Amino acid sequence: MSVKTIRFPVRGGFHARVKQRVHQYFVDNRMPKTGDWRLFLKTGIILTWFVRGGFHARVKQRVHQYFVDNRMPKTGDWRLFLKTGIILTWFVLFYVLYVFYATSLLMSLLTVVALAQGFILIGFNMMHDGAHHSYSRHKIINWLMGFTLDLIGGSHVRWRQKHNILHHTYTNIHECDADLHTAGLFRLSPEQPWHAWHRWQHLYAWPLYSVLTLSWALYGDVRTFVSGHIGPHPMPRQTRVEACLFVVTKLWYVGYMLVLPACFHPVLHVLIAFVVMHGLFGFTLSLVFQLAHTVEHTTFPIPEAHTGRMAHEWAVHEVETTANFAPTNAFARWYLGGLNFQIEHHLFASICHIHYPAISTIVRQTCDEFAIPYVCYPTVWAALVSHYRWLKTLGSRRMPPLTLIGGTVP
């Protein structure tokens, strides 16, 4: 039985053309054709950091010496405890006024606007420090402060993984920093794919920021609890106590924010007030964290393709990917819980926010010595303008590719 040879025409030109174009794509973007750090991340290989820069050791030593010289604890003191008392009094006062004394929709809205400030102040000043173990030297107090997030609609377990680990370790690294994940709704990093709707993101971002905490409270936390993942990142397995606390606190939140008010007010009024409160809460939280990282002068580094190694030591990476704003604004410092000093917070998350203005001088001087850019916008408005411009720049389809393997993207 004879075997026939199958032959293909060789003069079509398609294969040569498509091979040449695909090859040119990798040449233009200086990318390997094999797996890179994104594949390593999926298979469990951890990103590594350059360790011989010296900046981190120097700035840590100087900040530590500041506390030794002034005989001060790195955690909170009477100023934080007094602030806590003021915040809790404010929260309880306006919750009682809203539920038991508001007699119209207008009065309900006025009181929930004030109540939203209580939520914001708890999040920025109590929960955030507690979650980073910087509120007190006592573990149980730190846990209780972190747990206040559950009492205002969130989940301290999810926050610990998403914020403390994924965000603080891998700041502004695409596919690692969970704060950059928006399911394609926004393009916050040059490494994220562009979609047609991004050309308007500098306009639609502002109202959509308002739904952040509403989506957390009613959807995001529950999805993470059920799936066991934050995006592609697995959550540590929860204990039975943590699982029970999650369910109980979610029911508690729905009870005191929706069910109890509905016993004294029309259901529609309660729903409107609930959405307004979360709109203010979500908008403020979103904006503060966006101004700290997704602005014009921060960087978006990516690891080396084959090794997963970062170009700088971790501390340098944190400074270059973070920005401060309004450092001389006393109200901003008090209201935001020091989160306008994000560089100091990322370098020293275990130090209470009341110390950030003092140590910022030390950090900035050390950055100058090591020729590390220290981004600081003088006002909130300047930071807002920079964030707007960054959204508009990344939303432009004409924006050239910014990929730089093993380096940073300005």
Image (cartoon, rainbow, N blue to C red):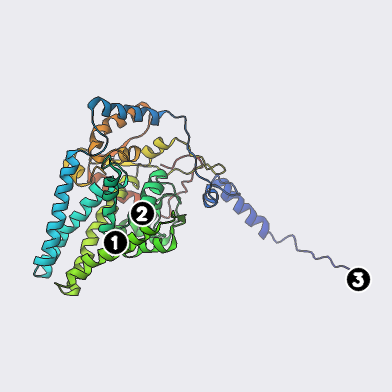
Q: Quadrant of the C terminus?
A: top left
Using the numbered discs, state the Cα–Cα distance from disc 3 to disc 2 in whole angstroms. Answer: 71 Å
Mark 2: secondary structure: helix
Kindly indicate whether the residue at mark 3 contacts the one at mark 1 (C-beta within 8 angstroms): no
Q: Quadrant of residue 68?
A: top left
Of labels 1 and 3, the one closer to you: 1
In the rendered structure, which disc, 1 or 3, sits on the residue that comes first in sequence? 3
Q: Amino acid at mark 3?
A: Met
Determine crowd level at label 3: few under 14, some 14-19, many 20+ residues with C-alpha closer than 10 A.
Answer: few
Query: Left or right: 251 with respect to 34?
Result: left
Q: Can you give x and y, in whole percent of width and height, for residue 409 in the image? A: 43, 42
Report how many numbered discs are placed on residues in the image.
Answer: 3
Q: Quadrant of residue 60?
A: top left
| Residue 151, above or below 329 | below
In the rendered structure, which disc, 2 or 1, sits on the residue that comes first in sequence? 2
Using the numbered discs, state the Cα–Cα distance from disc 2 to disc 1 in whole angstroms. Answer: 12 Å
Viewer-nearest residue: 23 or 69: 69
Q: Can you give x and y, in whole percent of width and height, for residue 307 in the image? A: 55, 41
For the point 32% across and 56% down, the residue is 202
* Residue on which disc 2 sits: 157
* Residue on which disc 1 sits: 249
Mark 1: secondary structure: helix
Q: Amino acid at mark 2?
A: Val
